[in-house]
Image: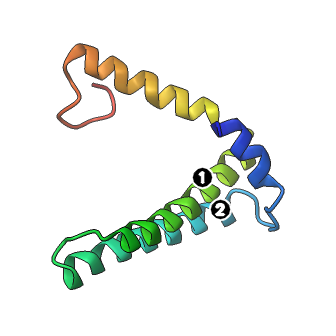
Amino acid sequence: MNFDNYQDQASKTAIYKHEVIYPALGLANEAGEVLGKIKKVLRDNDGQFTPEKREEIGKEIGDVLWYISALARDLDLSLGIPAQQNFDKLNSRLSRGVLGGSGDNR
């Protein structure tokens, strides 16, 4: 499934009133859930990601993707556009040897 197809399909399940704000808050929450599950693997499983833990984290990543998709839609962005822009940015950094380091304008 490509990003634009996902965005089209996911939008059919979007039921909320406060555009932009609702998916932004949901994104923060779901990203926190991903991190929480990873933290518990570090604490309880000595950092070993079992297939079950990977599946649980994958489900949370899916929730993150849903909120990213909704946020992009609310901002009138096709999800494929930021995906392509990010891909282009990273490839440019790779070709110029500046993937490491910090700052947006490398």
Q: Is residue 77 visible?
A: no
Distance in Å between CA atoms under marks 2 and 1: 7 Å
Q: Which of the labelled discs sits on residue 23, or is there none?
A: 2
Q: Residues within 10 Å of mark 2 (few under 14, many from 20)?
A: many
Q: Where is residue 75? Give x, y as percent.
A: 71, 44
Query: Relative to residue 98, is residue 61 drawn left or right?
Result: right
- The residue that mark 1 highlights is 68
Q: Is residue 31 above or below residue 6?
A: below
| Residue in the foreground of this view, choosing between 55 and 18 | 55
Quarter of the image for residue 10 reads: bottom right
Query: Relative to residue 60, is residue 22 drawn left or right?
Result: right
| Three-letter amino acid code of the residue under disc 2 | Pro
What residue appears at the point 54 percent right and 34 percent down from the top-left corner? Answer: 83
Q: Is residue 5 above or below residue 47?
A: above
Q: Quadrant of the N terminus?
A: top right
Q: Are marks 2 and 1 in contact (CB under 8 Å)?
A: yes
Q: Residue furthest top?
A: 95
Q: Is residue 31 visible?
A: yes
What residue appears at the point 45 percent right and 27 percent down from the top-left corner? Answer: 87
Q: Which of the labelled discs sits on residue 92, or is there none?
A: none
Q: Where is residue 73? Give x, y as percent.
A: 73, 46
| Three-letter amino acid code of the residue under disc 1 | Ile
Q: Residues within 10 Å of mark 1 (few under 14, many from 20)?
A: some
What residue appears at the point 56 percent right and 60 percent down from the top-left corner? Answer: 62
